[in-house]
């Protein structure tokens, strides 16, 4: 079965990136356009990160082979990620005296495969190429996130610094770029659509309920549903007032409590394995903390 990616975390298309990753930066700079100008009509071999310092610009994006099209309207302090391999073009000229920054980051092979998967629908249902990658919103509003602009400017500044220490310079730029991606993930969490968040929580909780023999880690669930682990954790905390681990523990212990009453002949060791506990001792400790009795005591008391 194809694994679904959470759609509530993006305003339109998503961009898949390996993160964190020792990223090579091809070029970075500030640009000022005195006259209204269309965005270049092109397919770049590098990811294009565009930060609008002042002005507006409307840019189009199209998947390969006549796939889905999308329009992005940028305003001051918006950031747009245009992934390598997709067709990008101008829709309306930028405003006069437009000022923006750009960073061209070199992609890795599986990013190219994930971001140019024929159509948006195909990209949304990837089961292989997107494994181990993080989905970023194409357009992220950064008006209340000044740290993003600062990091963007630091990367540009560092890329133009002639320190004579090429390896150290590249390491620093890569570190700054990963910090930038961290900030972008945090910012896009603030923009998530509530209905999409509810859908994600429903799907994850349904999976947990139907596979009681497994204790999922946040990382496993995040990869399964193609969403940032921190995003998933925050949604669960808001929805249930508890962490993913606490939610699973409470649910399993309630299942165990009912199981003890309906299946009195099943040994505690087997019960523990059926509900994802390491052994009967692990189960007994958790059960006693929640109900004040050991499983055997609870079973005898209610038999």
Image (cartoon, rainbow, N blue to C red):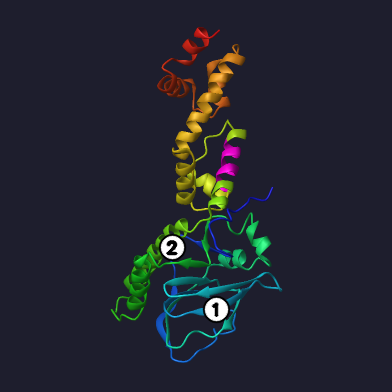
Q: Which of marks 2 and 1 is in front?
A: 1
Residue placed under numbered mark 2 in the picture: 184
Q: Which of marks 2 and 1 is nearer the N terminus?
A: 1
| Quadrant of the snapshot with the C terminus | top right
Q: Give the range drawn in magenta.
A: 200-208
Q: Is residue 47 visible?
A: no
In this rendered view, identify the residue nearer to me: 154 or 235.
Answer: 235
**Mark 1: few/some/many CA within 10 Å (<14, 14-19, 20+):** some
* Residue beneath disc 1: 58
Q: Name the residue rendered at 50%, 34% in the picture.
A: 248
Residue at 33% from the left image edge and 70% from the top image edge? 150
Q: Does residue 189 appear to the left or right of 146 in the view shown?
A: right
Label 2 to label 1, Cα distance in Å? 21 Å
Q: Residues within 10 Å of mark 2 (few under 14, many from 20)?
A: many
- Provide residue 187's location: percent of width, then percent of height: 43, 60
* 13 to 50, vertically: above or below: above
**Which residue occupies the foreground of this view, 151 or 75?**
75
Does the magenta run of residues contain 300?
Answer: no
């Amino acid at each position: 079965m194809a694994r679904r990616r959470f759609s509530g975390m993006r305003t339109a298309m998503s961009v898949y990136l390996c993160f964190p990753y020792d990223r090579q930066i091809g070029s970075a700079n500030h640009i000022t356009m005195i006259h209204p100008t269309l965005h270049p009509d092109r397919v770049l071999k590098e990811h294009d990160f565009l930060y609008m310092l002042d002005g507006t610009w409307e840019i189009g994006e199209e998947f390969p082979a006549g796939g889905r099209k999308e329009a992005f309207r940028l305003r001051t302090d918006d950031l747009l990620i245009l992934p390598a391999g997709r067709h990008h073009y101008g829709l309306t000229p930028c405003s006069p005296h437009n000022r923006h920054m750009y960073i061209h980051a070199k992609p890795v092979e599986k990013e190219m495969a994930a971001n140019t998967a024929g159509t948006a629908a195909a990209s949304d249902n990837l089961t292989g190429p997107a494994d181990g990658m993080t989905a970023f919103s194409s357009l992220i509003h950064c008006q209340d996130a000044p740290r993003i602009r600062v990091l963007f400017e630091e990367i540009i500044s560092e890329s133009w610094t002639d320190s004579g220490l090429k390896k150290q310079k590249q390491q620093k730029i890569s570190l700054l770029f990963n910090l930038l991606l961290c900030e972008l993930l945090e910012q896009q969490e603030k923009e998530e659509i509530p209905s999409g968040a509810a859908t994600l929580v429903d799907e994850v909780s349904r999976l947990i309920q139907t596979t009681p023999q497994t204790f999922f880690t946040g990382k496993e669930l995040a990869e399964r549903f193609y969403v940032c682990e921190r995003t998933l954790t925050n949604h669960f905390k808001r929805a249930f007032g508890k962490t993913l681990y606490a939610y699973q523990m409470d649910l399993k212990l309630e299942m165990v409590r009912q199981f003890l009453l309906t299946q009195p002949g099943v040994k505690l060791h087997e019960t523990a394995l059926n509900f994802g506990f390491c052994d009967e001792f692990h189960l007994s400790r958790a059960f006693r903390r929640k109900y004040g009795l050991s499983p055997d005591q609870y079973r005898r008391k209610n038999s």
